[in-house]
Image: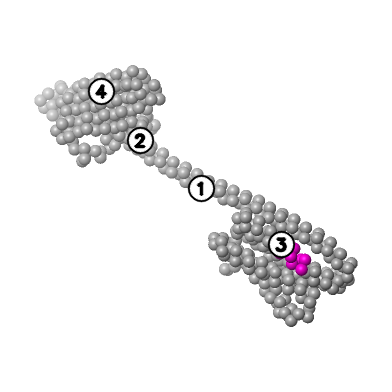
Amino acid sequence: MSRLIQIKKHPFPSLLYLEWTLLAITVLTAVIPPPLRQFRHKMPELSICGVFPDLSVCNILPQLSIYSLIIFALMGLRLPRSNQIIKVVYTAIEILMILMTGLFGERYARLFPFLYIILVTRSCLIFHLPGRLLVTTLSFTLFLFTTQLKYQLFNFQASPQAQERSRFLSLNWSLGFGLSLVFVLLMMNAVLSERHSREKLAIANEKLRQYAMRIENQATLEERNRIAREIHDSLGHSLTALNLQLETALKLWQSNPIKAETFLATAKELGSKALKDVRQSVSTMRSNPLQDQSLERAIASLSENFHRSNGILPIYQINIEYSLPPEINTAIYRITQESLTNISKYAKATEIKLELTTTRGNLRLIIQDNGRGFDLGQNTTGFGLHSMRDRTLALGGEFNINSTPGSGCKITVNIPLTRLT
């Protein structure tokens, strides 16, 4: 079970299976003697013990070479990934295992070139490009050194004709092996580059997905706030005015029924308007409450409604030099509407002044009353004030409130119009 886990943790499990398959095939070719018996008698095994079988260590080293081969195969299960020193030690142990197998294993000497190919393949998985080039160069150098050493040992007791043949075979074999190492290196670099690109693409896709989720959540939050502002600024205003009309009608019902009936009629109109606002909010949440009328006319209607509800006619002065974008018209209308609603609910004012002017590159709205005022440190957390501030900031403007208890309130809104000039 642990072996299966180790295989799954390998960066390329299929490559690990290929290594084992290659080792198994080459071991079989080493165990099964070649069919060319004559050539086998003329050319002994290319290992030290094959040339000098009388050495005392030759009784032990073949067994060590088998163990080295097994260890080398199992080392592929777990590749070092983080510590550079461990990577170097790991590669050095692999080279030691290859040398023991190639130099002292009489039967397994033919495995020698394939082990270097596996070494280069593994180095591509644990090192960056400079380390891969170094391991490949070292593998080819060790291969040339050990091959020349073995062929010199063989030529030591061979005939001149056999020496010439071995020199030719050694040259061709070294050239072919070097090209094989280069091919393996290039192939592994291409595979790893493609995998790295896929990983970067997957990371980018994941970041894009998370960013899209954040944008979606932010858009949802902003839309909720916008809907809340629309309901508060439209329906809240209408219901506040409706409540004032009903309270006035109740007070006048006994003493002046005719006038009370007038307030009830106004309340009915406000109720119809509130119902219309609810329907609009539920269906499309219209962003243009001006209903295709100019901003001057919309503010005049707000002042007339305020006068009918509270008996106070706001004094307003509007001086707009050029047409404004719909989003600015809507924001100014809603801020004015919310200000008049707050004055009607809390201020108990007897005089209200409203000034809306445009200068070059700037729009200024000032709403001032002489009501009872409030403490800015305690009464600036209402949704209405937040709504006005949010609308102003959304247009890149500035929103200021000046008020003290008993001294009224002054709201100043400045919105830049540089894009229109």
**Where in the figure is residue 387, as x and y percent of width and height?**
30, 35
Q: Quadrant of the N terminus?
A: bottom right
Cα–Cα span, label 2 and label 3 = 73 Å
Q: Determine contact: label 1, label 3, CB under 8 Å.
A: no
Residue 8: assigned label: none
What residue is shown with label 1?
206
Residue at the spot 77% in from the left edge and 66% down from the top edge: 148
**The residue under label 3 is which amino acid type?**
Thr
Determine if the magenta segment contains residue 145: yes
What residue is shown with label 4?
355
Q: Is residue 77 visible?
A: no
User: Magenta part mainly helix, strand or loop?
Assistant: helix
Q: Is residue 390 visible?
A: yes
Q: Quadrant of the C terminus?
A: top left
Are there few (<14), some (14-19), or many (20+) residues within 10 Å of tag 3?
few
**The residue under label 1 is which amino acid type?**
Glu
Q: Which comes sooner in the sequence, label 3 or label 4?
A: 3
Residue at the spot 75% in from the left edge and 63% down from the top edge: 144
